Image (tube, rainbow, N blue to C red):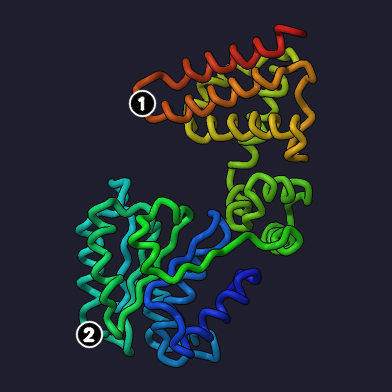
C-alpha cells in the first residue's frame, strides 16, 4: 500500500479477512481522490494472493504477477464502457456468471464494480441475487464516490467502509514528496481546491488543471477591477467548456463563502468590496446553468461571452 494514510485501513481489512469477519461484498466509499480504488485493488490482491506476507499480498506469486499484468483469470471487472455512460445489466450479468465458476488459480474469484453508482437500475437489480446468495469462494468489491446514488437494496447488503481524506499535514507531506519541484503555496492551494484529497490534488498539480484554474481566476478578478479581458477568452474557455464552468463556479462560490466567513485562502479577498452578495449568487447560478448546457448545441463561446458581460456589470454598477 503506497498511500500511507490508508495503511490502517489495509491492515484492518487484512485482519478481518484472516479472521473471516470481512463481508463478502465490501463497499468502499468516500470523496474522490483519496485512494479508494487503490485500496480496492490492494484488497483484491490480498484475497487472490497465494502466499500472503502477513497482512499484505506477497507481490511475487503467480496470482500477484497476473494481477499486476491485468490478466488474472479470477478477477472480473464491471466498469463503464468507453462509449457508454452507465454500467448495463449485461455487464453485471457477465460478472455474476464469472463468479459462479470454479477458480482457475487459488481458491477465490473476485468481482470489482467501479464506479458502482454508475450501474443503471436493471444492472443493480441483477446484482441483488449475487449479494443475497454469495458463493463461498467469491468476493464482490464495490467502489463509489457517491454511495447515496446506489439503491438502498444494494447498500444494505454490503459491508460499508467509509474512507476520509487524511490530515492536512499528512496530505501535504505526501504531496511534497511527489512534487518536490512545486512551490509549497501551490501545493496548499491544490489541497484547498480538492478538499485535502491528495490524489486529486496531485492530478491537478501535475497536469494543466491548476494553471488553467488560476488563469480563470485572474481573468475574473481583472474584469471585476475594470481591466480588459484578453482577446479570445470566450473561445479558449469554449475549448474546455466543462472545466471552465467548473472553475468559474468554484471561484464565485469561494468568494461568496469568504464573504460569509465560511472559507479562507484561495483568493477570498480579491474582489472589489462593493460586489453584492445577491449578485454573486446570481453569477454562481449562471455558471451552474452554463455547466449544464456544456454538451448541448448552444454555442459555448456565446454563453461564456454573455456570462462575462453579466459579471462585468456587477462591478460596473457601483464602480
Residue 68 location (% of width, % of height)? 42, 75
What residue is rendered at 55% in x and 77% in y? Answer: 10
Dot 2 or dot 1, earlier in sequence: 2
Residue situated in front as seen by the camera: 184 or 181 = 184
Give the residue pinned by disc 1: 296
What residue is rendered at 29% in x and 51% in y? Answer: 120
How far is mark 2 from mark 1, CA to CA? 48 Å
Q: Secondary structure at mark 2?
A: loop
Residue 170 location (% of width, % of height)? 72, 64
Give the residue pinned by disc 2: 102
Q: In this picture, is 67 found above or below 85? A: below
Q: Quadrant of residue 154?
A: bottom left
Q: Left or right: 30 with respect to 74?
A: right
Residue 258 location (% of width, % of height)? 74, 33
What residue is rendered at 65% in x and 13% in y? Answer: 312
Number of other residues with Cα within 10 Å of mark 1, as a class: few under 14, some 14 to 19, many 20 or more: few
Q: In this picture, is 136 found above or below 269? A: below
Q: Left or right: 206 with respect to 139?
A: right
What residue is rendered at 51% in x and 64% in y? Answer: 36
Amino acid at each position: 500500500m503506497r498511500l500511507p494514510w490508508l495503511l490502517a485501513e489495509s491492515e484492518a481489512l487484512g485482519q478481518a479477512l484472516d479472521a473471516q469477519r470481512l463481508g463478502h461484498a465490501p463497499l468502499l466509499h468516500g470523496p474522490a481522490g483519496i485512494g479508494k480504488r487503490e485500496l480496492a485493488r490492494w484488497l483484491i490482491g490480498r484475497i487472490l494472493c497465494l502466499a500472503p506476507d502477513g497482512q499484505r499480498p506477497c507481490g511475487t506469486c503467480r496470482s500477484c504477477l497476473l494481477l499486476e499484468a491485468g490478466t488474472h483469470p479470477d478477477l472480473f471487472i464491471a466498469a463503464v464502457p468507453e462509449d457508454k455512460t452507465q454500467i448495463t445489466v449485461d455487464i453485471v450479468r457477465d460478472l455474476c456468471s464469472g463468479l459462479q465458476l470454479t477458480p482457475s488459480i487459488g481458491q477465490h474469484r473476485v468481482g470489482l464494480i467501479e464506479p458502482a453508482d454508475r450501474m443503471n437500475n436493471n444492472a443493480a437489480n441483477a446484482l441483488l441475487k449475487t449479494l443475497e446468495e454469495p458463493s463461498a469462494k467469491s468476493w464482490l468489491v464495490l467502489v463509489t464516490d457517491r454511495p447515496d446514488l446506489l439503491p438502498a437494496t444494494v447498500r444494505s447488503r454490503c459491508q460499508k467502509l467509509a474512507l476520509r481524506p487524511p490530515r492536512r499535514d499528512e496530505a501535504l507531506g505526501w504531496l511534497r514528496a511527489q512534487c518536490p519541484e512545486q512551490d509549497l503555496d501551490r501545493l496548499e492551494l491544490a489541497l484547498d481546491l480538492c478538499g485535502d484529497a491528495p490524489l486529486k490534488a496531485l492530478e491537478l498539480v501535475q497536469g494543466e488543471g491548476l494553471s488553467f484554474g488560476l488563469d480563470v481566476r485572474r481573468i475574473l478578478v481583472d474584469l471585476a477591477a475594470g481591466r480588459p479581458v484578453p482577446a479570445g477568452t470566450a473561445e479558449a474557455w469554449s475549448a474546455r467548456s466543462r472545466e471552465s464552468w467548473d472553475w468559474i463556479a468554484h471561484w464565485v462560490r469561494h468568494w461568496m463563502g469568504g464573504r460569509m466567513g465560511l472559507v479562507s485562502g484561495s483568493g477570498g479577498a480579491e474582489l472589489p468590496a462593493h460586489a453584492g452578495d445577491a449578485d454573486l449568487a446570481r453569477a454562481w447560478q449562471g455558471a451552474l446553468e452554463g455547466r449544464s448546457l456544456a454538451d448541448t448545441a448552444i454555442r459555448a463561446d456565446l454563453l461564456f461571452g454573455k456570462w462575462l458581460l453579466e459579471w462585468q456589470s456587477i462591478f460596473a454598477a457601483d464602480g
